[in-house]
Image: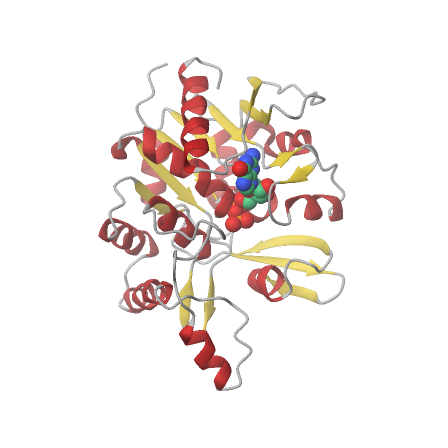
């Protein structure tokens, strides 16, 4: 098929790798990146949107290549000063990074929507493709943990370094949040949908929970493919495998494919997972080397994903 417009749905660091590759092989008007907002939170009066920032910094080539988030070469004088005041300052905010949160918060305060603010910030730092928060309304991932009871996402992820045992996850606000007009428009125009190798429970489910998106996507008559974040029973990074185990799932790419269910009609497993056995009710499973360490890897994987879509394998 001729691929004109692609929508990629992502969380932060893992999804950003594929989004980066796609942004380097597609023309800007061909690519829309729809991003999770359920990690967003208020901190010292500032609205922080970690996944949007990771995507933005990655696509602008601003990102810290070691962490995969934050701005390359940023300093942390503000945090040092906060600590001098006796604050714990557990959430890492770089000094340059702070400008993003300050400006976003000020524009929100003036009544602007997160969607238009994101577009404005992204364009200002040279990003030409479209980055959209899935919704303009607040959605918050809440984790019910064994050790601490109910934790907000950043408390679980950063303050407690995702060590508490997770019993249950919910997405506060998702039932009432609406997909933005821009997201609706991008989905109407799309020739194909790609899910980045993002964490199913922390990044993808909070996107799919907004505005019945899961059901809506299931009915779109276009290729809809997802890439696994789990390779040989392990997450490449972060808590995906730990959470799957704690929630009672098998830690495997197969369980990820099952998680997507009819939302997808194509799945990309890693070629290392030779024992993978699963067939989708509709569409097929493809194998790629999905490990993306360098920018060249990200571009290679993006090209391979596009070849799959253009070959009708979605
Ligand atoms: P977060 O919100 O920053 O955690 O980012 P995402 O949810 O978008 O991505 C996290 C997931 O990306 C983790 O579960 C990782 O296993 C996965 N991941 C990270 N790097 C890679 C990679 O190079 N290849 C694949 N297949 N998955 C990756």
| Residue 11 to residue 261: above or below | below
Q: Quadrant of ligand 1?
A: top right
Position of 180 with respect to 161 (left or right) is: left
| Residue 89 to residue 178: above or below | below
- Residue toward you, 265 or 51: 51
Most distant residue in the bottom direction: 85
Residue at point 43% right, 27% down? 300
**Residue 93 location, quadrant:** bottom left
- Residue toward you, 132 or 102: 102
Q: Is residue 44 visible?
A: no
- Residue toward you, 241 or 204: 241
Position of 114 with respect to 244 (left or right) is: left
Q: Position of residue 248 (x, y in %)?
A: 76, 43
| Residue 218 to residue 281: above or below | below
Q: Is residue 271 visible?
A: yes
Residue at point 67% right, 64% down? 150
Looking at the figure, which quarter contains the N terminus? Answer: top left
Q: Position of residue 75 (x, y in %)?
A: 40, 67
Q: Position of residue 132 (x, y in %)?
A: 35, 46
How many numbered discs sit on the rendered protein?
0
């Amino acid at each position: 098929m001729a691929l004109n417009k692609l929508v990629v749905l992502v969380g932060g660091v893992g999804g950003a790798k594929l989004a980066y590759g796609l942004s380097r092989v597609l023309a800007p008007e061909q690519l829309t990146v729809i991003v999770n907002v359920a990690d967003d939170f208020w901190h010292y009066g500032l609205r922080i949107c970690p996944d949007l920032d990771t995507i933005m910094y990655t696509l602008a080539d601003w990102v810290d290549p070691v962490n995969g988030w934050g701005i390359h070469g940023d300093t942390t004088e503000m945090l040092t000063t906060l600590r001098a005041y006796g604050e714990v300052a557990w959430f890492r905010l770089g000094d340059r990074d702070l400008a993003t949160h300050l400006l976003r918060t000020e524009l929100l305060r003036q009544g602007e929507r997160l969607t238009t603010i994101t577009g404005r910030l992204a364009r200002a730092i040279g990003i030409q493709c479209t980055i959209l928060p899935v919704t303009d309304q607040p959605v918050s991932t809440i984790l019910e943990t064994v050790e601490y009871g109910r934790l907000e996402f950043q408390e679980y992820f950063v303050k407690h370094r995702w060590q508490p045992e997770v019993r249950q996850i919910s997405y506060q606000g998702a039932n009432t949040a609406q997909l933005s007009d821009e997201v609706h428009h991008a989905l109407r125009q799309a020739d194909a949908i790609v899910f980045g190798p993002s964490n199913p429970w922390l990044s993808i489910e909070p996107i799919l929970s907004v505005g019945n998106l899961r059901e809506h996507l299931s009915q779109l008559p276009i290729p809809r493919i997802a890439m696994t974040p789990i390779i040989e029973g392990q997450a490449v990074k972060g808590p995906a495998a730990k959470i799957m185990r704690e929630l009672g799932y098998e830690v495997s790419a197969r369980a990820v494919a099952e998680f997507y269910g009819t939302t997808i009609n194509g799945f990309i497993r890693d070629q290392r997972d030779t024992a993978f056995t699963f067939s989708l009710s509709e569409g097929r499973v493809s194998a790629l080397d999905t490990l993306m360490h360098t920018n060249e890897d990200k571009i290679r994987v993006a090209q391979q994903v596009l070849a799959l879509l253009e070959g009708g394998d979605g």
